[in-house]
Image: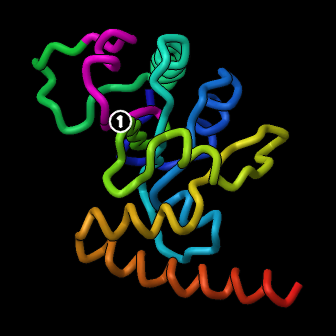
């Protein structure tokens, strides 16, 4: 198994989630990049719907990616199953492709149904993948409040203004 610290590729986890018909929305830096952000990111963040069927699909994908809790001591017992995911909400994992974070309740985001409904649907290698709307990304970055998130929110505001300007001219 490759050392995840040597590799970051968000595409295989995104495609695996799409192939398994997981109900998810890409958030964070990867979603910001889908809107034109130049900010670098080193993890894939996704918001997810919490039905039992969807949780089972997420767990199946995480197992296929050899997911392990990120930052947890190796001797901490954790059974990666739908019950564990149901009992929590936000999890950070290390996978064969780098870090993957799954968030049921990302700070600053609207309820999942709204996040999903407003998302930008893009085709990635013949699969539909939803990326959070730029205004929701700005709200999430503002809620995070870290210096890097404030910088990202400022860039996203400029991008949002440019997108709106182009749409108005069209």
Q: Is residue 58 left or right of residue 36?
A: left
**Is 65 rendered above or below residue 24?**
above
Query: Could you tell me which quadrant the C terminus lies in?
Result: bottom right
Q: Which residue is mark 1?
A: 94
Q: Position of residue 131 (x, y in %)?
A: 61, 52
Q: Quadrant of the N terminus?
A: top left
Q: Which residues are magenta?
A: 79-96
Q: Is residue 166 magenta?
A: no
Q: Is residue 90 magenta?
A: yes
Q: Which residue sits furthest right? A: 170
On screen, residue 67 versus residue 51, left or right, reads left
Q: Residue 51 placed where, x, y %?
A: 49, 18
Query: Can I make out residue 7 in this image?
Result: no
**Between 124 and 84, the one nearer to me in the picture:** 84
Lateral position of residue 74 relative to residue 32, left or right: left
**The residue tagged with tag 1: helix, strand or loop?**
strand
Residue 5 percent location from the top left of the image: 35, 46
Q: Residue at x 30, y 35 (%)?
A: 90
- In the rendered image, the vertical position of residue 17 relative to residue 61, given as above or below: below
The 10 Å Cα crowd at callout 1, few under 14, some 14 to 19, many 20 or more, is many
Residue 157 screen position, x and y as percent: 51, 82
Image position of 86 with respect to 35: above or below: above
User: Going 31% across and 37% down the picture, which residue do you hit?
Assistant: 92
The residue nearer to you, when weighing 65 against 114, is 114
- Decide if residue 118 is on the left or right side of residue 62: right
Q: In the image, what residue occupies the spot 10% across and 18% down? A: 75
In this view of the protein, can residue 72 be seen by the observer?
A: yes
């Amino acid at each position: 198994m490759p050392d995840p610290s040597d590799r970051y590729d968000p595409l295989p986890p995104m495609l695996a989630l799409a192939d398994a018909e997981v109900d998810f929305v890409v958030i964070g830096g990867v979603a910001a990049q889908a809107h034109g952000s130049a900010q670098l990111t080193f993890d894939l963040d996704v918001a997810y719907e919490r039905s039992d069927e969807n949780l089972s699909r997420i767990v199946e994908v995480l197992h296929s990616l050899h997911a392990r809790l990120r930052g947890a001591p190796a001797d901490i017992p954790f059974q990666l199953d739908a019950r564990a995911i149901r009992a929590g909400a936000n999890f950070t994992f290390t996978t064969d492709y780098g870090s993957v974070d799954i968030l049921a309740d990302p700070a600053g985001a609207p309820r999942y149904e709204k996040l999903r409904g407003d998302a930008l649907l893009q085709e990635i290698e013949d699969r539909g993948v939803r990326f959070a709307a730029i205004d929701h990304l700005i709200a999430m970055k503002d809620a995070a409040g870290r210096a890097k998130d404030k910088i990202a929110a400022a860039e996203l505001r400029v991008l949002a203004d440019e997108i709106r300007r182009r749409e108005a001219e069209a």
